[in-house]
Image (cartoon, rainbow, N blue to C red):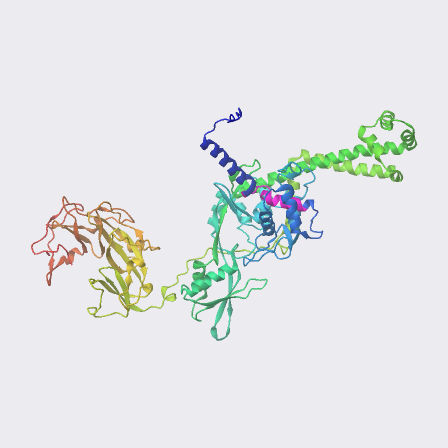
Amino acid sequence: MSEPVRDDTIRPVELKDALGERYLAYALSTIMSRSLPDVRDGLKPVHRRLLFAMQQLKLDPASGYKKCARVVGDVIGKYHPHGDSAVYEALVRLAQDFAQRYPLIDGQGNFGNIDGDNAAAMRYTESRLTQVAQALLQGINEDAIDFRSTYDGEEEEPVVLPSAFPNLLANGSAGIAVGMATSIPPHNAHEICDALKHLIKFPNATIAKLVEYMPGPDFPTGGELVESPESVQESYSTGRGSFRVRAKWEVEKLNHGLYHIVVTEIPYQVQKSRLIEKIADLLQNRKLPMLADVRDESTDLVRLVIEPRNRTIDPEQLMEQLFRQTDLESRFSLNMNVLDADHTPKVMNLREVLQAFLDHRHVVLLRRSRFRLGKIEHRLEVLGGLLIAYLNLDEVIRIIREEDQPKAELIRTFDLTDLQAESILNMRLRHLRKLEEMEIRREHDELMAEKLKIEELLSDDQLQWKTITWEISEIQKAFGKDTALGKRRTVIGDAPTAVVVPLEAFIEREPITVVCSEKGWIRAFKGHLADMSDLKYKDGDNARFAFHAQTTDKIIAFSTNGRFYTLGADKLPRGRGHGEPIRISIDLPNDHDLVTLFVHQPDRKLLVASTAGRGFAISENDVIAQTRTGKQILNVKGDDEAYACRFIDGDSVAVIGNNRKLLVFPLDELPEMARGQGVMLQRYKDGALSDIKVFKAEDGLSWRSGERTRTETDLITWIGKRGQAGRLAPRGFAVSNRFD
């Protein structure tokens, strides 16, 4: 058996340290190389590589199209070591005019549609760059930005694009990294340019002032922004928030007083086909009672026709119902989490994003100017050598023909630089006829004038920002509001006021009688039954709750676990048979039971209490539950349970324990709470709450005793402070220890 091979380079490492190191590396890679855009050009690496590869393929707007497969092949072969599907999906998105406010790629072929259909395979589609992409790449070959080696070291790729166009805000960005995300909506380029020029003029401009120039996002699919100005300003100030967008609609009048609603624009990133499916599903499930039908009549333009159930329905109420239940209204989140110039993720506000773009344009201007200055100085040096050659042409020809080392001889004879001598030697014979003194001096003078301008620019900060302002103005002219592409699409509307839609508009109002048995079987009979003695129940079951209601009412259930549940009266099972268990409609635990069941009346006050003698008052509006799990109101612990729920109609509270001690105290001593254990109503040494009642002191305290009702008006013996033990109940009080 051979000895194991020893390797001194192997060192023991804790597993958690190794995993932590690798996870951190993965997280940083995801953040910096995949998910977050650069604040300067607004692009992620895959998008930047796409544009650069297409620029290398000379796919400018004036050239012909090339197959997307060729582009994708170049990208994954040279720059982006990932799957072709991921690269092609990124290319497709950059070409979709309903996804990009200012498309960076001009696509030819099937690139998908707003219904959510996928693009054709890349072997069938063609693409080239747009004018916007060209603006992003402007100056890339003029040392405007840094380059780095590609993944295999064979090529170079740009770290960032020069970005004469404010792409981050104009087209927006979205991505999910490890532990962070970004979500930036698109904006109008004309408005961005206005804000940039104002920030150049006033570097300390407030967010409020910038928002005057940029009042909100401008989505490619249009729609109406219905967010309050205060909310918009707050979102831009913090870099976090959301924008509410609604579909744009109009009413088309028909004959005989009929009408239908036409939706012409839908919110951003909402798939039209899924939207229609959702509306149709709600319609089928009878959750849109005001709607009769919806149909899609779209061509190149969106046209959704919505038909009301009848002519009396208010269009505003119908659309409000659709906005609440469908994606005809959606929210687009704002989270301006981007990589700054140092590749550090940071959530920026609007001013910081604009300033970062301006700082980048300043760096690009200086680098391009120095690059051009270097080219000019190089050419001036060459022109100086050519002028000497022109003035001494015969001698130059002789040296080239006769001397063994003509370069060295030229340098010695005419005091030339190495570059000048090399330029003379490399000049073709056909160019000798062009060596005219006037032409050389004209070019020399033009370059000298340009050199002086560049040197002045590099030495004058104000002139630099003036130049940047001019560049921004040129972008504004090219993509401004006067152009078809730059015209604002999303309307800035007012924040919607609450449209009160009566329940009658949704549900047909009908009288019903609600019946619930001891074992929790609930049903609703049509009409208000006068006699309920003939109602039948399952064997071993009996009547418990029975009351009149309307189908538009909400039914409130209170259980021993301290939770309130809400049921729609229109959704109760009908009176045929024995109904169905109430636990089907609400998540009531098996070890708990109902305390009470009643019809909801808005603004009414309730008193809730537990067996431990603790309780409080609460508004009935605050007990409405939105889910079947209910709403926890009265907190109970241990063996205690929620025991009572009473309507507050009076000024005094009477509490009696199972020890037959009665306490009466003013209602003012009972606090109103939204949730909790409550305060001590009556103190017990060895006992529990038996009953509680709210009454008017002037009417006295009444209770049932057999077939009679007794009233005690002199309550001075039992009046005390809340939380006391109380005194024995008056003679003749009900044996059941209850008031009813």
Image spot of residue 396 (x, y percent): 89, 31
Image spot of residue 670 (x, y percent): 22, 49
Q: Is residue 434 left or right of residue 1?
A: right
Q: Residue at x 54, y 64 (%)?
A: 303
Specify whether residue 148 is painted magenta: no
Q: Residue at x 83, y 28 (%)?
A: 416
Specify whether residue 600 is in view: no
The residue sitting at the left extreme is: 731
Image spot of residue 101 (x, y percent): 58, 52
Q: Is residue 735 left or right of residue 503?
A: left
Position of the C terminus, as image quadrant, is: bottom left
Q: Which residues are magenta?
A: 35-54
In which image quadrant can residue 452 be found?
Answer: top right
Q: Is residue 681 left or right of residue 33?
A: left
Nearer to me, 497 or 39: 39
In which image quadrant can residue 425 be found?
Answer: top right
The residue sitting at the bottom extreme is: 256
Q: Is residue 263 left or right of residue 120?
A: left
Residue 629 lies, with reference to residue 2, above or below; the image says below
Specify whether residue 37 is painted magenta: yes
Residue 380 lies, with reference to residue 491, above or below; the image says above
Image spot of residue 735 (x, y percent): 10, 56
Nearer to me, 501 or 511: 511
